[in-house]
Image: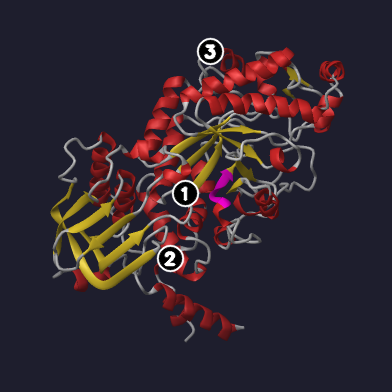
Amino acid sequence: MFLNAVFAAASLLAAVCHVDALWPLPRSLSEGTSALRLSYGFHITLPPDIASPPLDLIEAVARTQAYLFTDNLGRLVVGRGASDVSAFETAPYLPELTLSLAPGSTVLSITAEAQKPLGERDEAYTLTVPSNGSAASITATSTLGLFRGLTTFGQLWYEYDGTIYAINTPLEVEDSPAYPYRGLLLDTARNYFPVSDLLRQLDAMSMVKINQFHWHVVDSQSFALQIPGYEELAEYGAYSPQMIYSASDVVEIVSYAGARGIDVLVEIDTPGHTAAIGDAHPDFVACNLARPWADYAAEPPAGQLRMANKTVAEWTAGLFSAVAEMFPSTIVSTGGDEVNTYCYQEDPETQAILKASDSTLEEALNTFVMGTHGALLKAGKTPAVWEEMVLDYNLTLSNETLVLVWISSEDVQAVAEKGFRVIHAASNYFYLDCGAGEWIGDDPSGNSWCDPFKTWQYTYTFDPLANLTTEQYPLIMGGQQNLWTEQSSPSNLDPIVWPRAASSAEVFWSGAGGNLTAALPRLHDVSFRMQQRGINSIPLQPLWAVQDFAVVLDAHV
C-alpha cells in the first residue's frame, strides 16, 4: 500500500515539475525552460493599422498591464520563487507585447464579437514569447481573439522580491476553442445577489475563457428583473425594492460582460416556475401558492402560468419581446422545465378553456411556446429551452432551438437524435450546488436530490461526445456549470463556484481527455491568481502539497 502511494506521488511529481500555469490548456503549446523578466517599462502596443481601436480593447490592454504589475503571485513551489532567482537574475527583459490583426480582418469591439451567434464567434489567436528579450506578439483575426491571447499572456508571470518573471520561454501558442459555448449559470432568483457580485463572477469567468453567462434571473421565489412596460412584476415580485435589477443594472452587467468576452443569455422560465408573477397578476397563475406544494410544483411556492388562456399567452409573448430588446445576445431562454401537469388538471379555468376549444394540454403548450418563440424569432433571437420541451412533449420548435440537457447526461443522445443543438448542463456532472444537503426542512435524511458533491476532478472527466455518432458531433455547442442558489448567497458565492467552474471551462475549450494529474498544479495556479484579484476561490489542497509534492517522498524515502 505504502509503495503504491510512493509511486503515485513520484508520478505526480514528474507530471508537475514542468512549469505550465495556463488554463484552459491551449490547443497547441510549445514552451522552453528559459527565464525572462518583465521590464519595468513594459508596455502593450495596439495594432498600428487600427486608426480608432475599440474602447473595450484599449481598456482590456490597460487591465492586462495593470494585472501584470499587481497580481504579485509567487510561484507555487517551496520558497514561492526563491529557487528561481539564479535562473532569472541575469535573464533578458521583455520590453513589449505587440498586438496585430491579420490583413483583411474586420475591426469590431470585443463586445460585438462576443455577442455574435455561436457559430460566428472568432476566439482564435497566436501568442509568441521569445526568450531573448525581443518583443512578444499576439496575432488574431478579431479583437476577441486578441483578448483571449491577452488572458493567456497574463497567466505566464510570477513575482518574487519585486521581479516579475516567467520561466517557460521561448513560448509558442496556437489556440482556439473546441466548442463555441462555455458557460456558467447563476440563479439570482432563489437568493438575490448584488450587481457587484455578478461583476466579480464575470471577472473570474473571463480569467478561464468562459464566454457565456446564463442568467437565471427570475423564478417562483422572486421576480427581480425590472422590464420596461412590465415594471409591476419586479414591484410586486422582488424580495424588496433594494433587491431589483433595474434596466440600467442590466446595461452595466451586459457591458461589463461584453468587454470581458462574455455574452449574457437571460432566462425567463415559463410556463412553470412562475409563481412570482402571481404577486402582480394573480389571475394569470394556476395553483398559485397551492398546498401541499409538492403536488403542484417541483419546489415551493407552487404556481405556473395559465398557458391555455389566450390573454396570458399573448401577454407572455409581449414580455419576451420586451426582454429581447433589453439583451443584445442572440440567445434568450424560455425555460420550459418541470411543467406540472397535475396543476393544470386541477385548475378549473384551464380545464374549461381546454374543453371549450377541444384541445389537449400539449396542444395548449405548443400554442403557448410558438407564441413566445415567435416573439423571439421576430426579434432576431435564437430560443433556448430545457430538455423537457423536446423529450417530453411534441412541440413545433425551430430547428435552430438550443436545448440545455440538465436531468442527466444520458439524455443528450435522445436530443441529438431529434436533430437539435445541445448545450451540456447535466446535473450529474455540472451542478455546483449538489452535495450541500437538503434545503426543504421536513427531510430527516438531509441529502440533496442530486448527491454527491460534484468535484472538479469528476467534471474534468466529462466527454462531450460520449454516446454520439460522428454525424451528431456538430450538434454539440458546448456546456456550462450551474449554481442553483437555494443555499447560496453573497456569503458563499465565490467558494462554491471557484475554482470548480474552471474545470468545465477547460473541457469545453481544450476538449475532453485532459490528464487530471497534470491539471491539478495548473488549477492551483488559477485559484491562487483569482485570490490575488479579489475572488474568494477556495484551496484544493493543503499549502505544503501545493508547493512541493516531493515533501511526501522526502519523508519516507
Q: Residue 179: give x, y in percent of width and height.
A: 48, 53
In this picture, which residue range is highlighted in magenta?
475-482
Q: On residue 229, which mark appears?
A: 3
Q: Residues within 10 Å of mark 2 (few under 14, many from 20)?
A: many
* Tag 2: amino acid: Pro
Left or right: 377, with 534 as reference point: right
Q: Is residue 278 left or right of residue 352?
A: left
Q: Of 67 and 481, which appears nearest the observer? A: 481
Lateral position of residue 415 relative to residue 400, left or right: right
Residue 330 lies, in percent from the top left, at 48, 34
Q: Is residue 235 left or right of residue 297?
A: left
Q: Earlier in the sequence, mark 2 or mark 3?
A: 3
Q: Secondary structure under badge 1?
A: loop
Determine which quarter of the picture holds residue 387: top right
- 1 vs 2, front mark: 1
Who's the residue at 62% across and 45% down the image? 420
Mark before the other along the chain sequence, 1 or 3: 1
The amino acid type, in three-letter code, at marker 1 is: Pro
Residue at 72 percent across and 29 percent down: it is 366
Q: How many marks?
A: 3
Magenta highlight: main SS: strand
Instruction: List the residue tagged with mark 1.
Output: 180
**Alpha-carbon distance for marks 1 and 3?**
34 Å
Identify the element where label 2 is drawn: helix
For label 2, the residue is: 521
| Quadrant (top left, top right, bottom left, bottom right) of the N terminus | bottom right
